[in-house]
Image: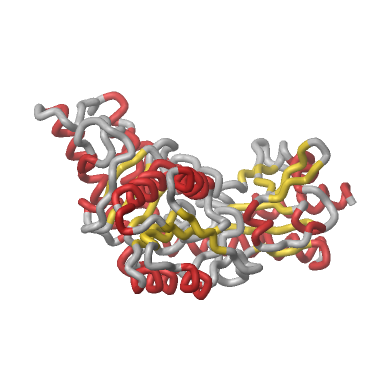
């Protein structure tokens, strides 16, 4: 019934490298090995490749090439954005606002900043995992310098109302950062439409390699270094550039932009097929949808199975399906993710939460197999 390899339904965790991306990278593994800072031919070839990738990333989000800084991934981009901005502007205020459902790469930075004298407000979310703009408006103070709210949630897929949030932030004279790791390649990410000042990208979420990312820094926004060394990446990210992976990120963002509408339709069709297949087989009484019913990533389906623990279900299907639990059992106690907790999902549902995320390589046949496997596994537990 199941395919020889497990059906991969965890594209929000990471993605495979696209063939086109790997092909673009390959010459920089064996042939073009120069240091981009060198002035001779080998270095010039590498510099041109980095410049081209920078242009590709910029065009993908409608930015200028000199507004793109390459990093080691989404975590470093988030650290550079938050720590770099906070340290550079602390004389203007020491108050930062974020949400309770951010990725640890944001929450842990905020907790660190609290230890060195910054004050952080963590905004709540509603039952769909959405930040209420009025909560932001009430929380902003004269000393607020930075607001960081993710574009779309990695667990439940809810897309935040960035337009309203950015407007409120700018009216108060603060700067807005968004973590777009999950939204790149799944929904339009246009910094002119969003209006954000800082935006983080993670390569391995959009079919580029692990270990590479980017940070958009709007012209005029000043950051302090968090690493120190030479003057690569406008002096903000010292260290010899990882040319091969940067080339991969550039190609991946280009591929994502060129095929965005086609991919959105593919993702949404498979997501809906999976959701309705589970609901129709197990009945609506046994399946709960988590996240916003309309404003969500097209590839992300977060559901709770009533009356069971997610780890028990996933253990039964581990050889057949790869997916992520929203709850875990340790030493007899069930721990619920901070996102599901913040959404106030009732415990009888919360402990059975599973995230499925489809991707470019997912097929209808795999979804149909997954429905059968999941439903049989659920019934065997009940």
Is residue 73 visible to us here?
A: yes
- Whether residue 83 sits left or right of residue 264 in the image: it is left
Which of the two residues, 126 or 35, is positioned nearer the viewer here? 126
Front residue of 333/159: it is 333
Instruction: Give the left or right position of residue 147, taking residue 326 as reference.
Output: left
Q: Is residue 331 left or right of residue 271?
A: right
Question: Which residue lies at the image location 46% right of the left edge and 45% below the top edge?
Answer: 109
Colour scheme shown: secondary structure
Q: Position of residue 49 (x, y in %)?
A: 22, 39
Q: Residue furthest left?
A: 40
Above-or-below relation of 243 to 146:
above
- Residue at 26%, 34% (x, y): give it: 238
Name the image quarter holding residue 228.
top left
Q: Is residue 251 visible?
A: no
State how many labels appear.
Answer: 0
Q: Position of residue 229 (x, y in %)?
A: 24, 30
Quadrant containing the N terminus in the rendered view? top right
- Residue at 42 percent of width and 61 percent of height: 147
Which of 235/317 is in front? Answer: 235
Q: At which x and y percent is residue 104?
A: 53, 46
Horizontally, residue 296 falls left or right of residue 327, namely left
Position of residue 311 measured from the top left corner of the image (x, y, whole percent): 76, 43
């Amino acid at each position: 019934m199941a395919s020889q390899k497990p059906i991969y339904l965890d594209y929000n965790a990471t993605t495979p490298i696209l063939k086109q991306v790997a092909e673009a990278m390959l010459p920089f593994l064996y042939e073009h090995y120069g240091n981009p800072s060198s002035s001779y031919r080998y270095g010039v070839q590498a510099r041109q490749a980095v410049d081209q990738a920078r242009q590709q990333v910029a065009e993908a989000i409608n930015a200028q090439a000199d507004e793109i800084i390459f990093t080691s991934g989404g975590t470093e981009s988030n650290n550079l954005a938050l720590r770099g901005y906070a340290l550079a502007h602390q004389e203007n205020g020491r108050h930062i606002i974020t949400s309770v459902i951010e990725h640890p790469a944001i929450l842990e930075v905020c907790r660190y900043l609290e230890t060195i004298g910054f004050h952080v407000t963590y905004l709540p979310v509603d039952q769909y995992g959405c930040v209420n703009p009025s909560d932001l408006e009430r929380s902003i103070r004269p000393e607020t310098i930075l607001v960081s709210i993710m574009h779309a949630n990695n667990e439940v897929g809810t897309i935040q109302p960035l337009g309203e949030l950015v407007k409120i932030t700018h009216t108060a004279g603060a700067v807005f950062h968004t973590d777009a790791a999950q939204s790149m390649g799944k929904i339009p990410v246009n910094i002119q439409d969003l209006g954000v000042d800082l935006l983080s990208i993670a390569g391995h979420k959009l079919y580029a390699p692990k270990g590479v990312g980017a940070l958009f820094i709007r012209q005029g926004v000043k950051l302090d270094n968090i690493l120190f060394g030479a003057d690569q990446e406008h002096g903000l990210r010292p260290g010899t550039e990882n040319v091969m992976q940067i080339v991969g990120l550039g190609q991946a963002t280009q591929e994502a932009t060129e095929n965005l509408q086609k991919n959105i339709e593919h993702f949404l069709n498979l997501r809906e097929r999976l959701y309705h297949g589970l609901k129709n087989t197990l009945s609506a009484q046994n399946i709960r949808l988590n996240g916003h019913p309309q404003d969500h990533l097209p590839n992300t389906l977060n559901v709770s199975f009533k009356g069971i623990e997610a780890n028990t279900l996933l253990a039964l299907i581990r050889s057949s399906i790869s997916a992520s639990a929203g709850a875990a059992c340790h030493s007899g106690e069930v721990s619920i993710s901070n996102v599901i907790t913040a959404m106030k999902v009732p415990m009888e549902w919360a402990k059975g939460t599973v995230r499925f995320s489809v991707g470019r390589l997912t097929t209808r046949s795999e979804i149909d197999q997954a429905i059968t496997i999941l439903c049989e596994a659920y019934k065997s537990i009940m």
